[in-house]
Amino acid sequence: MVDPHRITFESHGAPIVGHLFVPAREGRLPAVVVDGPLTSVKEQAQGNHARALAERGFIALAFDHRFFGESGGQPRQYESPPQKIEDLRAAVDFLAAHERVDDRRIGAVGVCAGAGYVASAVAEDPRIRAFAAVAGFFHDVAMQLKWMGPAGFEATIASGRAARERWEATGQVDTIPAVGEGEVAMPLAEAFNYYGTPRGAVANYVNAFAVMSREHTIPYDAQAAAPRIRVPTAIVHSEKALAPALARSFHAALGGPKAIHWLTSQGQVDFYDDPQLIAAAADIVAVHLRAALG
């Protein structure tokens, strides 16, 4: 068992609070930043995977993005892919400067939506030498258009833009639940079974989603990052996890060394907290990171 150290760093002037998991080993070690699902915080999926990777010899960082959890920034519960990608770069800054980290051996891991955000960070930041995704949701703007229809797609983005303009004018933040009944950010029943129950509703988590987020989450396209990713990449997924077809298309478009591994799961969210499934994924990711980072 590796216990986390509470750490802080800054991203664009906002304080970021994270958990750094450091193995009981001497010397400078390879490190990974681990990102998590939509609206999530460090005590949830990303923290569980960071701990598992630390138990396998990597310094691992899970953190609350700006606008979420213990980290700063306004408006609260604002899910902004561009700003989450900026936070990931700031997290790499923190790791690269840490006395225990070998800054030539830094990787990044994403779970669910976090994999899609990490993809852009990896494509843009040469300091990240390896990438792994666990049950990744690889946002695809063409598929989003197909799912929603052109009118629904444009109307949803417009509603996000209007909410952002209202916040800028009045300071009022329009929110909906992240999970639950009616209009929610994550309408899947298994999402509620995780975030809407004691299973995943940790004290640091807020079940809310700023409507203005839709201005950027709906048109975000992680698939576009795949051809620009040249570092070794491993994808761990399941046929019963979220959007396996998008995982396959992302894998096919990757521009560097790549592998895809299929595990058996009940669905998506057991990748967040099932100890056996987390261990199986971490074993695959650890082998990949050792080979890629040396």
Image (cartoon, grey):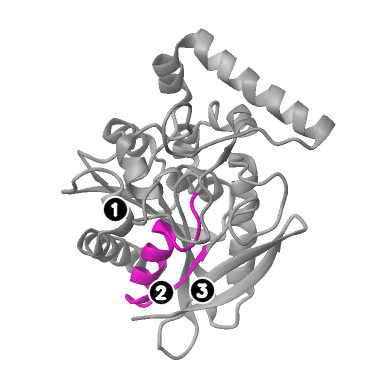
Q: Alpha-carbon distance for marks 2 and 1?
A: 20 Å
Bin the neighbour count of mark 3 within 10 Å (Cα to Cα): few under 14, some 14-19, many 20 and up: many
In the rendered image, residue 240, in percent from the top left (x then y), is placed at 21, 39
Q: Which residues are magenta?
A: 40-62
**Mark 3 residue element:** strand
Q: Which quarter of the rendered picture does the C terminus lie within?
A: bottom left
Q: Which quarter of the rendered picture does the N terminus lie within?
A: bottom left
Q: Which residue is mark 3?
A: 20
Mark 2 or mark 1: whose residue is earlier in sequence? 2
Residue type beneath disc 2: Phe
> Is 64 placed left or right of 240 in the picture?
right
Circles 1, 3 touching at the beta carbon (< 8 Å): no
Q: Alpha-carbon distance for marks 3 and 2?
A: 10 Å
Label number found at residue 26: none
Bin the neighbour count of mark 1 within 10 Å (Cα to Cα): few under 14, some 14-19, many 20 and up: many
Q: Which residue is mark 1?
A: 271
Q: Residue at x 27, y 35 (%)?
A: 244
Q: Residue at x 34, y 34 (%)?
A: 188
Query: In the picture shown, does residue 15 fall above or below 158?
Result: below
Bin the neighbour count of mark 2 within 10 Å (Cα to Cα): few under 14, some 14-19, many 20 and up: many
